[in-house]
Image: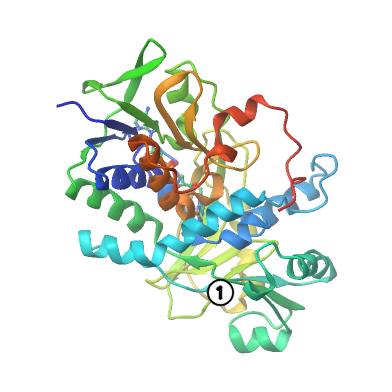
Amino acid sequence: MSPDVVVVGGGVIGCAVAYYAAKRGLRVTLVDQPRRGRATSASAGGLWPLGESVGLGCGVIYYKAMAGLGALPDGVHGPGQLPRSFLDFAVRSNEMFPALAGELRAETGLDVEYEPTSLLFLMYDEGDVSFARPLWEHCPCGRDLTEWLTPDEVARAEPAVTPEVRGALRFHGDNQVNPYRLADAFRAAARALGAAILTHTEVTGLKVASNRVTAVETEAGVIPCGYVVNAAGAWAPEVGRMAGLDIPVRPVRGQIVGTETLPKVLSACLSTTDCYLAQKGHGEVIIGSTTEEVGFDAGVTPAALKTLAAGAVRAVPFLANVRVKRTWSGLRPGTPDELPILGPVEGLGGYLSACGHFRTGILNAPLTGLLTADLIVGDRPSFPVEPFLLSRFTRERSPRGSGPL
Ligand SMILES: Cc1cc2nc3c(=O)[nH]c(=O)nc-3n(C[C@H](O)[C@H](O)[C@H](O)COP(=O)(O)OP(=O)(O)OC[C@H]3O[C@@H](n4cnc5c(N)ncnc54)[C@H](O)[C@@H]3O)c2cc1C
């Protein structure tokens, strides 16, 4: 019997869609050809809806790099804040994690290492303070979710952090997870619910008849289906072209350094203008990450690794004495306005987007999966999809960073 839905791409997004669709009783086939640089395998696993929405995490690193190059777009004077619709989506997705972690553990036995914690933006100088103060005073997420820490309070909360700070801004509710485990658990749970998972299988074409996708062509044969979901990450444009769509997703490389396993040294995740740091459940400290426009080059460079390492040692001096265990990079599926591309496309039936999750695909995977399943079965969407439709790129847009939260 042919599936109701074929999901193209087996990263965290495709696996989440497969899970939520299978949970609704749909017949699901997921097809994945692992490509070098796929983002889920590279992620840090930060669940930072507040921090990322106001431009911290990678945003602040990107801003600093662009400002240093004199390459900021006209009218942009700080890290871009994302629109309210994004913040609300990300907060809602983040709220799904505690129950989801239990659900996935019960269904698969896998622990996704969900850790409730917070994100601390460390302030080194007057520039950092003047950037952080308005975020604290006018935080769109509300004052009770942010906290201004004095240097003494930082020292008490995070003894490993350098005393050379002017303070820190804390975002409560910005948590973390193990990203690989999350994708594995979604995949295993989808399979347990009856989904067929075709690994190492390339999708080579989409069959379209009377303005509707009717089948997916793969190396292993043609799969007729009711819906196809494009969850191909940075390669989503390739899959879109198979149905005549122009999808503005591009690869944005991120490099990361991982330390040897350490005893617990950090309670919170840290964000600075140089890098971010997150200690994972197994003790490794993840030091990320660059945001580079280098096409599909998934290599690592000594210069970037050196900068990240120096940033980490500046924030947590003790790290000067530990070993680097591994370095890697991945390709974020970036979009021009930094928002994901979700939902249906006008004039093409049987096709749904679930791509362009840029630097927050781990965070936004649960709600993306749930919402996509809602759309397939025809239920009222769990979250309004309009701000994320592909059609927004056919309308005139304001420049990045200018949309207030
Ligand atoms: C360094 C780094 C750090 C990050 N940190 C965070 C973080 O802390 N928090 C967070 O929320 N997000 C983070 N992200 C972003 C997050 O990893 C991505 O948004 C997310 O993984 C995107 O998932 P995806 O499933 O869309 O893409 P991918 O994981 O890239 O998966 C797409 C899959 O589709 C497959 N595919 C492509 N074309 C085809 C085809 N024709 N046929 C079959 N299969 C195909 C690919 O091989 C791949 O397996 C980070 C990303 C990077 C690179």
Is residue 257 among the parts visible in the rendering? no
* 382 w.r.t. 215: above or below: below
- Mark 1 = which residue? 319
Q: Position of residue 33 (x, y in %)?
A: 32, 33
Q: Position of residue 127 (x, y in %)?
A: 83, 65
Where disc 1 sits, the SS reads helix
Residue 381 place in picture, x, y as percent: 44, 43
- Residue under the point 19% across and 48% down: 193
Compared across the picture, whether 169 is left or right of 279 comes to right
Say above or below: 383 vs 203: below
Between 42 and 376, the one lying in front of the other is 376
Return the residue nearer the eye: 27 or 184: 27
Which image quadrant for residue 36?
A: top left
**Residue at left offset 46%, top offset 73%:** 116
Ligand 1 image position (quadrant): top left
For disc 1, the neighbor class at 10 Å (few under 14, some 14 to 19, many from 20) is some
Tell me if 39 is positioned left or right of 76 in this view: left
In the image as oriented, which residue stretches furthest toward the left?
1
**How has the structure been colored for display?**
rainbow
In the rendered view, tell whether residue 46 sits above or below residue 222.
below
Q: Residue at x 17, y 43 (%)?
A: 194
Whether residue 177 is visible here, answered yes or no, is yes
Q: In the displayed structure, would residue 51 be above or below residue 164? A: above
Q: Position of residue 161 (x, y in %)?
A: 62, 79
Between 346 and 256, the one nearer to me in the picture: 346
Amino acid type shown at disc 1: Leu
In this figure, what is the number of numbered marks? 1
